[in-house]
Image: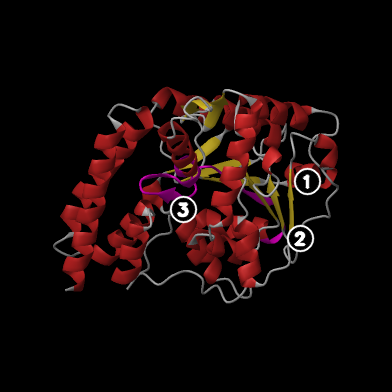
């Protein structure tokens, strides 16, 4: 039987894998990389903290507003920010890295940049036994930003652009923090020299979990990519605004890969076929079983569960049901992003979708 013709992605992967091997591909992790109960993980953390402060009558004015779209707070006083910094640190200290981070750790990226303050990526490297360096930009005390060693495949660098939760004052929680971060990056000292050199040498950027409609995301994109204009892929990104989509494609030359393209998982499988390429044995990719899918759905990894269901249900009587539920989930995401429905109604609808998806899994398994 003749093999199916290679897709455009499959044709590009050999080049991408070679760039990863040579350290010419940089992975950037955004705030939407992990979802919990239908919302991005960091947003969930902020929502819980905000709700706790509003429910306590003595603290109701501590956080004046929670800007969900920008992922930032407005605090009444500086002391209130200090409280939230330590509350967020406490929350993140209790978390373990999701499976996706362990999968990323297997791929020999030289440099990974995260805009999140968590330590999930270093923890995933520790779990895999990979020596690595970790550093972060401290907008509060720029002079503390220490020099770095040249990142390599044997000793990769994880760089948190928006601080570390273990240094609470370095996190970006409001617009004052954000402006200091941008000012610091654009200053004469700015980012460490060897980090800037690695960015300048990159031929490809992979953006995973970014919300490109945000103005400061576009600014950071420009600051990081510089004048060289490397090739950029935005993975699992859907832009509902066609005008924004057109602008980003023309201005920043970004190629958007929708969730249904399954870009990252397809890349991982391509990496598995390379001899002695993945760190460890590459076995971190969880086998797609009904039990694994239920676990992903129950832990808020809805899109991962839907993707896995597609492969498990291909050609079965449940395939059409999955298409309908997948479309319903995409409409739910659009309403959630655009704030066109009450948050309580959105939560009910999300739970209904997940329950229906789990019902399909159980039907297959029975």
User: At which x and y percent is residue 289?
Assistant: 32, 71
Count neighbours of disc 1 (C-alpha within 10 A) and say few if under 14, some if 14 to 19, many if 20 or more.
Answer: some
Q: Earlier in the sequence, mark 2 or mark 1?
A: 2
Taking depth in this image into account, of 6 and 274 the one nearest to the observer is: 274
**Quadrant of the rendered image containing residue 39:** top left
Q: Residue sitting at 78 percent across and 46 percent down? A: 195
Which numbered disc covers residue 233? none
In the image, the segment drawn in magenta is: 21-44
Location of mark 2 (residue): 152
Q: CA distance from mark 3 to mark 1?
A: 26 Å
Location of mark 3 (residue): 263
Q: Are marks 3 and 1 in contact (CB under 8 Å)?
A: no
**Quadrant of the rendered image containing residue 362:** bottom left
Location of mark 1 (residue): 195
From the viewer's perspective, tell me whether residue 103 is left or right of residue 287: right
- Quarter of the figure that contains the C terminus: bottom left
């Amino acid at each position: 039987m003749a093999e199916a013709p290679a897709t455009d992605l499959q044709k590009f992967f050999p080049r991408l894998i070679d760039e990863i091997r040579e350290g010419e591909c940089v992975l950037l992790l955004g705030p939407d990389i992990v979802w919990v109960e239908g919302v991005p993980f960091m947003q969930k953390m902020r929502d819980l903290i905000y709700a706790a402060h509003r429910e306590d009558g003595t603290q109701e004015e501590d956080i004046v507003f929670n800007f969900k779209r920008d992922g930032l707070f407005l605090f009444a006083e500086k002391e209130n920010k200090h409280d939230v910094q330590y509350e967020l640190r406490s929350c993140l200290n209790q978390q373990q890295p999701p499976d996706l981070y362990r999968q990323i750790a297997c791929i020999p990226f030289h440099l990974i940049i995260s805009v999140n303050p968590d330590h999930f990526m270093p923890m995933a490297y520790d779990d895999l036994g990979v020596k690595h360096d970790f550093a972060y930009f401290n907008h509060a005390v720029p002079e503390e930003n220490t020099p770095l060693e040249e990142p390599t495949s044997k000793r990769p660098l994880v760089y948190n652009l928006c601080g570390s939760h273990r240094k609470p004052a370095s996190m970006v929680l409001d617009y004052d923090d954000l402006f200091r971060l941008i000012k610091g990056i654009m200053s004469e000292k700015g980012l460490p020299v060897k980090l800037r050199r690695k960015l300048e040498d990159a031929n490809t950027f992979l953006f995973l979990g970014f919300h490109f409609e945000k103005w400061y995301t576009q600014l950071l994109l420009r600051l990081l990519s510089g004048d060289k204009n490397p090739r950029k892929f935005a993975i699992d990104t859907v832009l509902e605004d066609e005008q924004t989509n057109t602008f980003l494609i023309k201005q920043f030359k970004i190629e958007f890969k929708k969730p249904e393209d399954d870009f990252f998982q397809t890349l991982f499988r391509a990496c598995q076929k390379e001899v002695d390429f993945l760190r460890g044995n590459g076995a971190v990719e969880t086998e797609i079983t009904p039990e694994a899918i239920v676990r992903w759905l129950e832990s808020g990894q809805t899109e991962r569960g839907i993707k896995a269901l597609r492969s498990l249900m291909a050609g079965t009587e449940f395939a059409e049901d999955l298409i309908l539920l997948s479309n319903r989930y995409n409409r739910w995401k659009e309403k959630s992003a655009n704030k066109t429905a009450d948050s309580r109604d959105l939560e009910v609808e999300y739970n209904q979708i997940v329950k229906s998806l789990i019902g399909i899994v159980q039907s297959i398994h029975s």
